[in-house]
Image (cartoon, grey):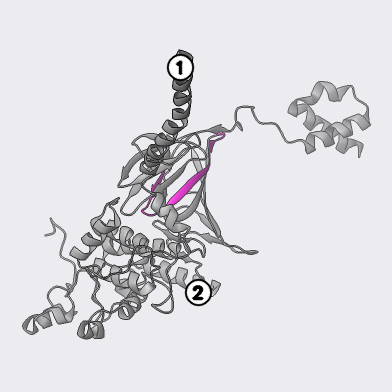
Amino acid sequence: MRRWVVSAALAAMAAAVPLFALQEKPQEKKEDQKKESRTAYVRRIFQKDRCNFGDVCRIVLSLAKGEHTDAPFAEIQKDLAQRGIIEGEGGPEESVAVTKGTVAYMLCQTLGIKGGLVARVFGLSRRYAFRECVYTGLLRGKTEMEYVTGRELLDALAEAEIYMLAGHLDSERK
Amino acid sequence: MKMTLEAMATALLLLGGAVLAQDMPIDSRLSAIVQAKQDPPKAAPDAGKKEDIEASLVAFKGTVDVKRPEDKDWVPAERNMKLKKGSEICTAVASTAKLLFTGNVQVDVKALTQARIEDLAKAGGKVNADVNLKFGSIEVEIQKGDLKADMKVTAPNSTTSVSGSHGLVRAPAAGGGAHITLRTWTGTWIHHLPGPDTDQHIGGAGVANDRGDSARDLRYRFSIDQFLNFFGKDEDELFEGPLTKKAGDPNPWDVPLWEFGGIGPAGPKNRKPGALPFPPGHP
């Protein structure tokens, strides 16, 4: 009887070892996610063919605040809405690909670019915001309906930072 | 012929091969002279020895990560961190980093930039630095010092050799080559674009922009910049019209009508004095 009990206990312990191992794995994954470097999003954006709304919101909020932000998308969206950079509710989801018109609109709101006479009379739309950004030198392209690549977004943000510091994109400042 | 060989052998004597040359037959003397002409004089063994040096991260602002050769992943930057050959640096939005390669070579890494130190070595009183700029912009300042600095900035579609001066190299992430802005007139920057015979020697202040511009456009822009700098004016001042404004100036529609006259070129703010005042102490 004792032999049965001992062997059953040993078998239970042997079966429990992989279970413990399975329980530890998710914790390690969480730690790995936490360890991701703070500039990883910049390198990730650089490799993207199409940027999503989450990327643009994060990098534009970092520009507006002047510091890097690691907050979740919902908080970033709320913060941007409070600053008037995006609409509060009913906006696109995080994974939606973004057009140049949307990026231009967000940049104009962040940098305080009000546009020309027509934009002032009829309001700043994505189309006028894109034309204004092309005129200012922040963005390049043909129409506001083009999708933004990661590299174009990084270039636009680099230019926007100069604009924010200097108020213009003079060649001496680049 | 014999006299010439005698004279050359005498020269060899002065160079230090006298004892050997005296007892040799004429053919051996000739071969010795040819050998002496072909072999350049060997420098001291320590003079050409390449010694790797480290760059120091003297200051940074915002979010800056580095990846040294021994690091598995990117780590946050720390002050006085040593970066040796093969190290990478990446900056986020609103972040900058200042690297000191040697006492007289300083590199400012601007925001949204990723760069890699390809080579950083000292050899015979000369520092060789090779920086690979993946995207973003860096500002290079080379001052006169004991060590002669020879720096090369490699962007995806162009290479810039820097042997002095102070300037900024910008590599747009979207490609199209680097964009150079020089701050001073000194030094020589050579900008190599892809394709044969496309080296551009940039001797003074100017802007090199190869993003789709033709060579004629480049020359035009250089001449304009040099002209403007020579007369102490910038582009804004030259192309300033009655309706153009600078940053910070109010828009005409933001100004009340009763103050509108004051913001024009003849207004009190923009009116320039007819002549400079006398210096202090003038009778």
Q: Position of residue A88 (x, y in %)?
A: 21, 68
The quadrant the C terminus of chain B occupies is: bottom left
Q: Secondary structure at mark 2?
A: helix
- Please give the name of the residue rendered at 45% of the width and 17% of the height, measured from the top-left corner: A6
* As drawn, A127 above or below B163: below
Q: Residue furthest front?
A: A1
Say which mark, if any, is on residue B19: none
> Which span of residues is magenta-colored?
B105-124
**Which element type, helix, strand or loop, lies under badge 1?**
helix
Disc 2 vs disc 1: Cβ atoms closer than 8 Å? no
Quote the CA–CA distance across marks 2 and 1.
89 Å
Q: Is residue A47 above or below residue A117?
A: above
Identify the residue under disc 2: B217
Residue under the point 29% across and 77% down: B240
Quadrant of the frame with the N terminus of chain B: top right
Give whichever of A60, B8 is nearer the camera: A60
